[in-house]
């Protein structure tokens, strides 16, 4: 994993390195120029001193006044940098010389402590001899930490001789008007030599260097502080933007950044806030849309349930009315048929031969039987009118109810080629319900399953616990129900059976009964494979969970972005 | 009591029910009177002897429930058979009124006959309607009547 270096660190480091390089270069240039200047000053002073000495020493040299020469030299020695000075004649013989005592030099730490007086003086004399012998009249000679200035002492001939003789100052004219006199007009009578140590200027240069290093370091430090502050201030809005972007990505559309600055970053902040606002609007619209859609779905579900409930209620009304209207004529038909049967049995009917009596009796009995069937159909219808049944909701052991109910239909099953299999879950908790209704529900579903099996097949009845609900499944290996009919099987009067074989009420009655008890019924079917009805009842003591009403709320979180 | 226990009043707005029951009961020896609503039925109670009333529930003018209430004011012990056309819904009879029975339409004639027999043979509690014979041997009296 590569280390992440932030924009801020990078900017600070880059700018600091640049500043450092700049400062060091500047320091180096200044130091170089400074030391050069110090050096040239030393050289200038030495040169002037040597020139003055040579000039002043002209006359005493001519007359060999060593005392005067010594005085001049003492004056020169007042300069602490001068370690040696001397006057030589044209033969190179020393007329006067002065040497700095070595102990003073030791004290001032100008020379190493192991340098002896004799050694130093020998070295100086030796060098000066070399300088004299070389007749090198360059401005200076540098050797072993010393700078030597050799200036010839000469007297002029020609145009200036008179003045020079009068004044007695032979070297003056040459010194004053050197350009006017050529070398040929001169007579070198000796040389003035001054040796100066570079120790002091090196010390000064070292001090200068040290000071400059300190100043530069301090300057760099201050510059770095300023740079980091400036960079931080410049980059902080970007960091805020980074944080804000993260928040927006996380879904916080109320997040705003400060946009006070009047620069590119300020523009960016304004654009960001505009974008976030637009995003929020779009998101809100989307949420509204989702809520609306959820509401529409809910409404549709409620409407479907209302339609279903309305159908059932209307059917209940209808059933009551139909029962009242039909039962009277039905009572008439049944009653007269019975009366006729009785009369026939008592041979009270005239004009019918004895052979015909059984035949006619069977006709009338058929009439009576069909009336009984009508009565049954009307009673089925009336089960809707029993919505407010007085049976109390009690704790019911569903396994026991299923066992009892199956015992009732067992006879019918044994007459057919249908195998009944049962799988009861152990230790099922009780459910809240009404035994009578439950029996009716199970009977209806099992009879439905029997009718779905054309020849031979299996009906499997099972029970199980599913969280807070007890499930009862009735699965058959019958013909199955096509998908387009699955939604309709619970609708009143929907039937696929031949006319007269089913009223189309069995499953809608079942649906109503299950819902009355707070349960749910669902159906799953594959044509040619079979159908499974699943009943679900809440365990006693658990509130049944209904799909409606339901609250469709989407949580929104909003937090303003705090400044750091 | 001088009157024979064979007078039955049939109250129903349906002609078919009235004629069916008249036919059947008169053949069995009962004296039958009919009315098409509760109000006329109640008026006929004053016209003569009535030993048993068979009444529908849903009728114009005065329905079965009201009729039963009025009949009880006249005679708390008069046997009444109420015919429901919607089972379990039309009328609830007072549990302690042993003189009332219900049958559901459409009824079976055998069921109706046995209900009449049961009501007429029940032990009488009202001293107003006691006769010596009925008090001493109510079962025999009923058998004589049938």
Image: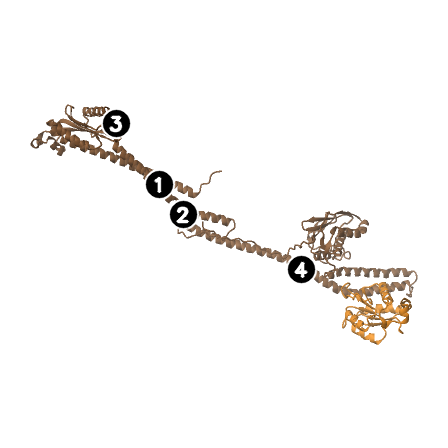
Chain colours: A brown, B orange
Report in which chain the residue with disc 1 lies.
A
**In the image, which disc is placed on residue B74?**
none
User: Mark 1 or mark 2, which is nearer the start of the sequence?
Assistant: 1
Q: Quadrant of the C terminus of chain B?
A: bottom right
Specify whether residue A183 is in view.
no
**Mark 4, secondary structure of its residue:** helix
Q: CA distance from mark 3 to mark 4?
A: 121 Å
* Residue matched to label 1: A220
Whole-Å distance between the Cαs marked 3 and 2? 57 Å
- Quarter location, residue A112: top left
- Label 3–label 1 contact, CB within 8 A: no
Q: Position of residue A105 (x, y in %)?
A: 24, 29
Q: Residues within 10 Å of mark 2 (few under 14, many from 20)?
A: few
Vertical side of B15 occupied by A106: above or below: above
First in residue order: circle 3 vs circle 2: 3
Is the residue at mark 3 from the same chain as the one at mark 2? yes
| Same-chain check, marks 3 and 1 | yes
Subunit under mark 4: A
Which mark is first along the chain, 4 or 2? 2
- Relative horizontal placement of residue A416, taking residue A247 as reference (left or right): right
Relative to A480, does residue A60 appear above or below in the rendering?
Answer: above
Seen from the viewer's position, the closer of residues A212 and B108 is A212
Mark 2 → mark 1, Cα distance in angstroms? 20 Å
Residue beneath label 3, please? A144
Residue A459 horizontal/vertical position (percent): 76, 48
Residue bearing mark 2: A233
- Depth check, front residue: A56 or A342: A56
Q: Is residue A131 above or below residue A281?
A: above
Instruction: Name the residue tied to disc 4.
Output: A307
- The answer to whether residue A184 is left or right of residue B74 is left
Share a chain, discs 2 and 1? yes
């Amino acid at each position: 994993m590569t280390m992440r270096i932030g924009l801020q660190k990078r900017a600070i480091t880059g700018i600091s390195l640049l500043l450092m390089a700049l400062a060091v270069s500047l320091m180096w240039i200044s130091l170089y120029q400074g030391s050069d200047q110090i050096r040239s000053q030393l050289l200038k002073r030495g040169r002037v001193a040597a020139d003055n000495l040579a000039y002043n020493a002209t006359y005493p040299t001519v007359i060999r006044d060593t005392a005067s020469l010594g005085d001049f030299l003492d004056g020169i020695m007042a300069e602490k940098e001068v370690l040696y000075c001397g006057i030589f004649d044209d033969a190179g013989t020393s007329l006067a010389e002065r040497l700095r005592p070595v102990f003073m030099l030791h004290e001032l730490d100008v020379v190493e402590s192991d340098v002896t007086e004799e050694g130093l003086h020998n070295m100086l004399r030796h060098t000066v001899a070399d300088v004299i012998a070389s007749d090198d009249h360059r401005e200076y000679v540098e050797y072993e930490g010393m700078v030597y200035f050799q200036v010839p002492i000469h007297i002029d001939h020609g145009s200036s001789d008179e003045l020079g003789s009068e004044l007695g100052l032979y070297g003056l004219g040459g010194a004053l008007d050197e350009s006017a006199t050529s070398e040929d007009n001169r007579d070198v009578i000796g040389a003035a030599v001054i040796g100066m140590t570079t120790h002091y200027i090196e010390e000064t240069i070292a001090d200068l260097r040290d000071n400059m290093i300190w100043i530069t370091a301090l300057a760099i430090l201050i510059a770095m502080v300023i740079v980091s502050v400036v960079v931080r201030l410049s980059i902080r809005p970007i960091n805020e933007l980074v944080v804000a972007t993260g928040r927006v990505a996380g879904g916080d559309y109320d997040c705003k950044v400060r946009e006070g600055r009047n620069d590119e970053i300020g523009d960016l902040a304004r654009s960001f806030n505009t974008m976030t606002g637009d995003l929020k609007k779009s998101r809100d619209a989307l949420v509204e849309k989702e809520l609306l859609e959820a509401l529409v779905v809910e409404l549709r579900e409620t409407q479907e349930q209302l339609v279903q409930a309305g159908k059932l209620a209307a059917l209940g009304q209808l059933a009551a009315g139909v029962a009242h209207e039909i039962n009277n004529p039905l009572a008439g038909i049944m009653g007269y048929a019975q009366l006729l049967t009785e009369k026939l049995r008592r041979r009270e009917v005239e004009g019918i031969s004895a052979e015909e009596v059984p035949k006619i009796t069977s006709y009338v009995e058929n009439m009576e039987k069909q009336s009984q069937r009508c009565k049954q159909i009307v009673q089925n219808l009336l089960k809707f009118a029993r919505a407010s049944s007085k049976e109390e909701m009690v704790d019911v052991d569903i396994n026991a109810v299923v066992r009892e109910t199956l015992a009732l239909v067992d006879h019918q099953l044994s007459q057919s080629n249908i195998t009944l299999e049962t799988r009861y879950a152990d230790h099922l908790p009780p459910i809240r319900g009404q035994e009578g209704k439950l029996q009716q529900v199970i009977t209806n579903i099992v009879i439905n399953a029997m009718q779905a099996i054309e020849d031979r097949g299996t009906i499997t009845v099972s029970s199980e616990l599913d969280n807070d609900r007890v499930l009862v499944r009735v699965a058959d290996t019958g013909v199955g129900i096509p998908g387009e009919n699955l939604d309709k099987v619970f609708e009143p009067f929907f039937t696929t059976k031949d006319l007269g074989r089913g009223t189309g009420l069995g499953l809608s009655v079942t649906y109503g009964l299950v819902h009355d008890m707070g349960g749910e019924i669902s159906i799953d079917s594959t044509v040619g494979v079979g159908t499974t009805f699943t009943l679900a009842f809440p365990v006693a003591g658990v509130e049944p969970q209904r799909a409606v009403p339901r609250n469709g709320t989407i949580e929104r979180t909003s937090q303003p972005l705090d400044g750091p | 009591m001088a009157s024979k226990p064979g007078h039955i009043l049939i109250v129903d707005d349906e002609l078919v029910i009235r004629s069916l029951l008249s036919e059947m009961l008169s053949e069995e020896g009962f004296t039958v009177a009919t009315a098409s609503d509760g109000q006329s039925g109640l008026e006929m109670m004053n016209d003569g002897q009535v030993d048993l009333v068979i009444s529908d529930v849903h009728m114009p003018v005065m329905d079965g429930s009201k009729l039963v209430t009025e009949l009880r004011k006249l005679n708390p012990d008069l046997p009444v058979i109420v015919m429901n056309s919607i089972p379990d819904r039309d009328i609830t009879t007072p549990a302690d009124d042993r003189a009332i029975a219900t049958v559901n339409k459409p009824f079976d004639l055998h069921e109706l006959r046995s209900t009449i027999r049961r009501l007429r043979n029940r032990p009488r509690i009202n001293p107003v309607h006691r006769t010596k014979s009925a008090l001493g041997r109510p079962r025999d009296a009923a058998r004589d009547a049938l």
